[in-house]
Amino acid sequence: MESLIAMKGVVKRYPGVIALRDVSLSVRPGEVMALVGENGAGKSTLLKVLAGAVQADEGTIEVNGTVVQISSPRDSQASGIAVIYQELNLANDLSVAENIYVGREPRTRFGTVDFKAMDRGATELLTGLGISISPRDLVGDLNIALRQMVEIAKALLVDARVVVMDEPTSSLTEEEVDTLLTLVRRLRSNGVSVIYVSHRMREIYEIADRITVMRDGAVVGVCEAAETAPGEVIQMMVGRELDDLYGVRSKPVDYSVPAALEVRGLSSGALLHDVSFSVQPGEILVLAGLIGAGRSDAALTIFGATKRSGGEILVDQKALALRNPSEAMAAGIGFVPEDRKQQGLFLGLSVRENISSASLPSISRLSFVSRRRDRDLAKRLAGDLSLRQSAVEVAAGTLSGGNQQKVVLARWLARKPRTLILDEPTRGVDVGAKAEIYRLIRTIADEGVAVVVISSELTEVLGIADRILVMREGYGVGELAVASASETRIMAMATGLEGEQS
Amino acid sequence: MTIKEAVVGTGGTAGGTVPNGTPPARQGVGQRIRGQAWKVLTARESSLAGVVIVLVIFLSFASPYFMTVGNLTVVGRQIALALIISVGMTFVILIGGIDLSVGSTVALVSVLTGQLMVTSGLPPALAVILALIGGTLVGLVNGTINAFVGIPSFVVTLGMLAVARGLALGTTGGSTISGFPAAFLYLGQGSFLGIPIPVWIAVVIAFAAHFVLTRTTFGRHIYFVGSNEEAAKLSGIRVRRVKIAVFMISASLASVSGILETARLSVGQPAAGNGYELLAIGAAVIGGASLFGGVGGILGTALGTSLLLLIQNALILLGISAYWQQVFSGVIIVAAVALNMWRRGRR
């Protein structure tokens, strides 16, 4: 059958990284194509190329057999492609109809907006999709699933022939997922093609006709959903060799001593339910799972930055309240957050000030900061982490991703923590710096610090972990010793193919 | 194994390690002085200082009255009163906030001083202390609402601007209070070693503030909160306490200025301090403070205050109508910020 849309030999390079290597993808009319792959496999870049948000360096895109040039989101729309991102693009204070018609408002004879025609058109579209909401409802009052429907209706208004959905169900409840899947089927029966990006095997097998698997920026396989077992797809997603990037443990973890940190039944709002685990001094525990599985929420809750609604946290076997970060720090806990720029660094301030920011009492007397001790501390840690010592006075924002991460690490190492929590410590960091960070983590653990690492990269999880806790949808779904863990097994637990909720 | 060995073992991929055993090149004394001089010249404040100096030179040639003791005393007092408020405003702007209520606080404190000292007949020292406490409470309210309810400081202090001014007008029925004891008036009108008392007070406050911001943990916390509130929180800084303290500093300094203003004019008046908030914000911004927080300093603010008030003085001396002063002030504020952004963009 003729393809409705075909990408051929698409290459996208970023400085130092090849995000897409010779990627080809074709979708037939009225087909649901699932696009799967680990985080960082290149799915998002591929979507951005389709949406016109970034331009490919090589390769062509054909729609209905003719090559089209997509260099802006406008070109993409004109070619009949509609991309629906995880973060929806809606104005919450405007009505459903206004959102659907945004930028294309019908006019009356007098040049004013024809609200009647707009409401009529919107109702028509929504009924066509089988959704019963009023075009006058405010988008802000709708739940996430219905907002997605509005986004889809918006796409159909411009006669989209290909609808691309990026992890549309990541924030939906079971019921809402069903509604969405019904809608996807309806789109298919109307001859619209759907590219469906998701991690969730169950959904994929419910609606996909074919599955394209990506890994490390390349397509590693295209299979018919009906003829391929989920296990095979996961194998294709993760099949990679481990290398010695991660360093070697020099002494075994002592499980006879009491845990440095233990959480029992930790809960926080709707994000975290009854999670329990413990970490030994010198041990590296990795919290694995998909993005949004509640791992960061667990970290923030332990650190006192998010309110705890249930469970207890024991540091050295003593239950502590840990109501705010300074109490957690007093208990010897350090936390390197996920988003360096938003949560970690003072980008406009110097590296020196960033490093000493959590250790001011130890370098001051009567709250007067000693400049000498401030400088010495920064220089010592910069030396320890092989940051250029001359760089301690430059603004942290001017450093590369890897060096920025080292600055955040230095801030916590300056406090000599007994438990260190690192949330995605190698995100946005180049390969060389990654290896350094892995070795640092290994060294910190060897010195007797209990380390908790949150990671979405499976090779990284297996490379650095002593023990792995897999989380899914806010629950801990299983614990694995690294010897008995495999990428397939973790992925199966993280996507809900294996393991029950504990 | 130590951390250092671990990292060096990987070959120091990032940031080029300094080879061990090579001592840093010793600098000659002359070289060091030249280095310091260069640092001063390229500092953010130096171009502003240059503008102020040029303006002073220009004025001393353009008007025979500028360099007279009388005029310099007047200008010095004006700069001092405005600087005290601008210093407080700098603290607030550094955490990424704004305090629109300082002008009204001046009025409230002015009236309060009059009521306590003249109407109730309290001893001057006690009356001044109570008025200061009263004014500082304004900041406590601002800071508490901002930190705990989460209403943006712009809105909170906009409300307070009206409330404090209303209190000053309401309790006095809009009339002024006079009849202060001479000892109190000396605060605003007297001189020490030929220099007006308010100038001494402003200089002490500015130095203290500069010291707090650059040398103390509290000062660091202010820059952290302004630079990245979320990161500050995750570094264990009690962000709310910092916010409340900063608004109290701003209000207490506005109160000091209000007391000096009352002593200078010999009247407690509910109309005092009108528009001071804009002057203070303008001064801080001209001095290089960023309204997004985290950037700025007392030196810049002091230069900004001087520039704005010297220009006012210049327009008077050159016989240009007072009505036009605002046009000049406005243009200068925007031009200074544009210049700062251009400099930052170039780096």
Image: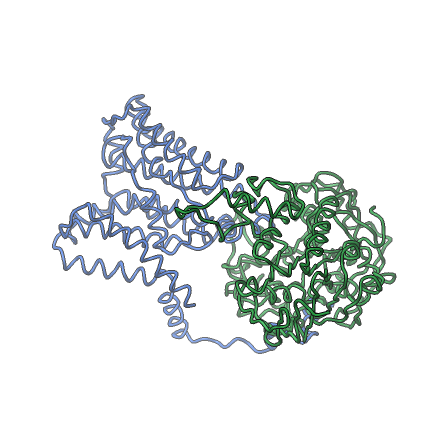
Q: In which quarter of the image is the N terminus of chain A?
A: bottom right
Q: Nearer the viewer, residue A194 or B185?
A: A194
Horizontally, residue B43 falls left or right of residue A264, namely left
Residue displayed at 49% across by 53% down: A103
Q: Which chain is green?
A: A
Horizontally, residue B309 falls left or right of residue A432, namely left
Q: Where is residue B199 in the image (x, y as percent from the top left)?
A: 28, 46
Vertical side of A84 occupied by A68: above or below = below
Q: Where is residue B335 in the image (x, y as percent from the top left)?
A: 31, 58
Q: Where is residue B34 in the image (x, y as percent from the top left)?
A: 37, 72
Residue displayed at 68% across by 42% down: A322
Q: Can residue A288 be seen in this view?
A: no
Numbered disc total: 0
Q: In the displayed image of the protein, which residue is found farthest to the left?
A: B64
Q: Nearer the viewer, residue A21 or A222?
A: A222
Q: How is the image coloured?
A: by chain
Residue displayed at 32% across by 44% down: B201
Q: Is residue A462 visible?
A: yes
Please name the color used to draw chain B: blue
Horizontally, residue A472 falls left or right of residue A229, namely left
Q: Which of B309 and B343 is in front in this view?
A: B343
Q: In the displayed image of the protein, which residue is found farthest to the front?
A: A109
Q: Where is residue A86 in the image (x, y as percent from the top left)?
A: 63, 54
Q: In the displayed image of the protein, which residue is found farthest to the top?
A: B120
